[in-house]
Image: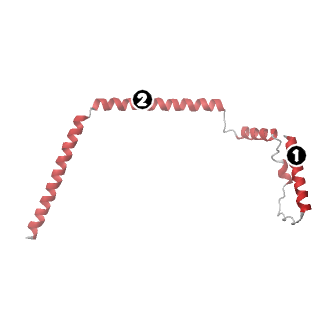
Amino acid sequence: MQGIQIQLMTASGQEAITSALKGACATNRTISGMMDPKSIQRIVAEYSKESMRNEMMQELTGDALDNAMGDLDDADAEDELVNQVLAEIGISQLADAAAAPSGAVAAPAETTGPTATTAMDTNNMSDLQNRLNNL
């Protein structure tokens, strides 16, 4: 009895699969009838042509920009340009580096009161004024 039940279940499963495949085949036939292979081939060829055209335009644009901008990968030219700009604004890159402390720097002693603050403000103001004059 149990063997017959298994055979019936197998048969009903196979019938369901067959029915589903019939529906899929009918849908596939309908879609195939709606599609025009020649128009699809024409669309793919047009897309390929436009894609190649875009690649060429991108390459030409990149070459034109490279020619207009010059060789920006030249490290010496970049350093020279940076030094020129720094010189124009009055900053020396290495001049202050020699005066920088190289060891441990002790924290300045804290002084409180109006005289310490006023002296620091005066030094800062004169320093700022000198920098503005150099510009």
Check the image and report above or below for 59 versus 8: above
36 vs 53, nearest the viewer: 36
In primary-sequence order, the first of circles 2 and 1 is: 2
In this rendering, position of residue 20 left or right of residue 97: left
Q: Which mark is residue 129?
A: 1
Label 2 secondary element:
helix
Image quadrant containing the C terminus:
top right
Identity, as a three-letter code, of the amino acid under mark 1: Gln
**Residue 39: image location, x then y, percent:** 30, 30
Residue 56: x %, y % from top left: 50, 30
User: Left or right: where does residue 12 sit relative to residue 118?
Assistant: left
Above or below for 123 versus 38: below
Q: Which residue is mark 2?
A: 49
In this rendering, would 74 be left or right of 39? right
Report the colour scheme: secondary structure
Q: Amino acid at mark 2?
A: Lys
CA gap, disc 2 and disc 1: 65 Å
Q: Residue at x 40, y 32 (%)?
A: 47
Viewer-closest of 105 and 94 = 105
